[in-house]
Amino acid sequence: METTDTSDALITTTVQSETSTRESRPDKTVITTDNLDVYYGTEQALTGVSATIPEKKVTAIIGPSGCGKSTFLRCINRMNDQINACRVDGDLSFRNKNVYDEDVDPVALRRKIGMVFQKPNPFPKSIYDNVAYGLRVQGRDVTDEDVETALRGAALWDEVKDQLDESGLELSGGQQQRLCIARAIAPDPEVILMDEPASALDPVATSKIEDLIEDLAEDYTVVIVTHNMQQAARISDKTAVFLTGGKLVEFGDTSEVFEDPDDQRVEDYITGKFG
Ligand SMILES: Nc1ncnc2c1ncn2[C@@H]1O[C@H](COP(=O)(O)OP(=O)(O)OP(=O)(O)O)[C@@H](O)[C@H]1O
Ligand SMILES: [Mg+2]
């Protein structure tokens, strides 16, 4: 039964044995929201959001500024716990377990659902220690192999393998962002949330991050907020469009959302009529 392995999903590492490619893989839901409302004090930031996020695919979240994209992302791994005024109503489940249930440990949840932010934020530590950090905070022993695996997974190993003792802050912006991705994948999460991960980067660094995101979706579920509609169209399998008022107005296969949206407001938004 699905419900019996849910709490385990928050405390153990699942073995992944997919062999098919991402495109041909049938959708299996990892995260479900049902009528999700989010408030900051009396201001409502998300209104009745119901969505299903498929496993090992890239789901893009787009929409105009202030429509609740970051709020939605932060709800998924309870990063919004740190915002006092924030209140969540409705259901948000990860592998059929409501992440807001009292018995869910947010630290264990974030081990399963990692996050990468807009501005690369490496710690003022060595490249090695930046990657090892994610494992050490869980009390796990760190091997050189763990660090190499994570850096390879973030397509950074070849560029830094001879300078692992140097500060992460010495790297270029794009390399710093890939270092943050290595730090996020080191604990072997299932889901990686990314909030505009390339918007502070130049076109070459952006292109590397986009390629990396597509590779990551072979092993992880990726949810990415982006302001860049071409980027969403290029790299995502599913697209969610939020509009003002924090409403999810369109959610489906990326090609359909961009080529034939159901909602006129979405058509206006993606053709640049507003936003
Ligand atoms: N910490 C906070 N405290 C109070 N209100 C907040 C907070 N964070 C966001 N909000 C409000 O919630 C709404 C949604 O904000 P959110 O940051 O989720 O939007 P967004 O779609 O990510 O915008 P952007 O594209 O500018 O990043 C906005 O009205 C914003 O002012
Ligand atoms: Mg945002």
Image (cartoon, rainbow, N blue to C red):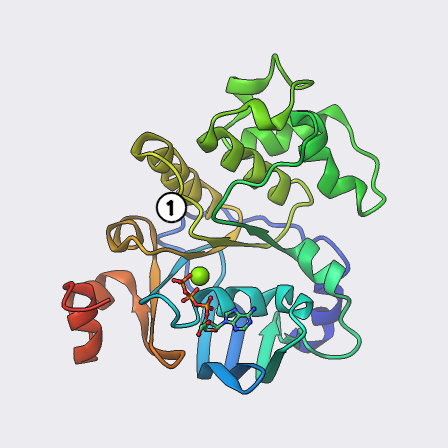
Between residues 33 and 126, which one lies in front from this camera angle?
126
Residue 168: image quadrant is: top right
- In this rendering, does residue 35 appear at all? no
Left or right placement of residue 271 versus residue 226 in this view: left
| Residue that carries the numbered disc 1 in the rendered image | 199
Quadrant of the image containing the N terminus: bottom right
- In this rendering, does residue 153 appear at all? yes
- Looking at the image, in which quadrant does ligand 2 appear? bottom left
| Position of residue 97 measured from the top left corner of the image (x, y, whole percent) | 66, 75
Left or right placement of residue 89 versus residue 206 in this view: right
Q: Say above or below: 32 vs 21.
A: below
What is the number of callouts on the image? 1
Quadrant of the image containing the C terminus: bottom left
Q: Is mark 1 within 8 Å of ligand 1?
A: no
- Kindly identify the residue that appears in the image at 44 percent across and 47 percent down: 197
| Position of residue 121 measured from the top left corner of the image (x, y, whole percent) | 58, 41
Left or right placement of residue 186 versus residue 222 in this view: right
Q: Say above or below: 38 vs 193.
A: below
